[in-house]
Amino acid sequence: MPEKNKSLAPAFLICFLASALGAPIAPAMCAGDAGSAAAEAPASRPGSQFIAQDDDVPSDDTDVPPQDVDKYIKVYQAMQHDRNLTVEQATAQQGLSVSQFRGLEDRIERNDALREHVRDALKPKAAASPAK
């Protein structure tokens, strides 16, 4: 990968995850330099070839598919709802082993945006004030 494109990966990942999670993000982060640098990369290296990334190989230790984030949140929500539920029971309800859940937890904890998304999702909802 050309040196110029390596610096684009974090910005692209942030934009992708933010859009997948519906998180607000500054438009300047996802446009401008990253897009124009990516567009000019082939022109700066005539004859260079780009290879598509294999879906089977994770590109980063902090990449977490949205459906896995949802499972992670549902495990914790189930344990919040039923305090007698064990982690083994809650993970089994989502089709996960405890070790898979802990691996998922580790990846989420290393991703700042996902960690904040999960924290927000698990915050207790404010009780509706009674009508007067």
Image: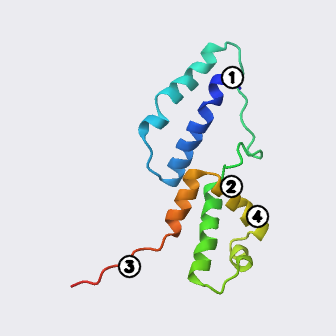
Mark 4 lies on residue: 100
| Tags 1 and 4 touching, CB below 8 Å | no
Helix, strand or loop for disc 3: loop
- Is mark 2 in CB contact (under 8 Å) with mark 1? no
> In the picture, residue 37 is in which quadrant?
top right
Query: Can you identify the residue that label 3 sits on?
Result: 127
Is the N terminus in the top left, top right, bottom left or bottom right quadrant?
top right
Q: N-terminal of the two: label 2 or label 3?
A: 2
- The numbered mark, 1 or 4, whose residue comes first in the sequence reads 1
Q: Against 53, is 21 above or below?
A: below
Please tell me which residue is depicted at 60% across the width and 56% down the height of the picture.
Answer: 66
Q: Residue at x 42, y 41 (%)?
A: 26
Q: CA distance from mark 3 to mark 4?
A: 34 Å
Q: Secondary structure at mark 2?
A: helix
Of callouts 3 and 4, the N-terminal one: 4
Between circles 4 and 2, the one closer to the viewer is 2
Return the x and y of residue 80 as percentages of the image width and height.
57, 79
Tag 1 secondary structure:
loop
> Does residue 67 appear anywhere in the picture?
yes
Which secondary structure lies at badge 4?
helix
Among numbered discs 1 and 3, the one appearing first in the sequence: 1
Residue placed under numbered mark 2 in the picture = 107
Amino acid found under the numbered disc labelled 4: Gln
Query: Residue 105 in the image: x percent, y percent?
Result: 68, 61
Residue under label 1, please give it.
2
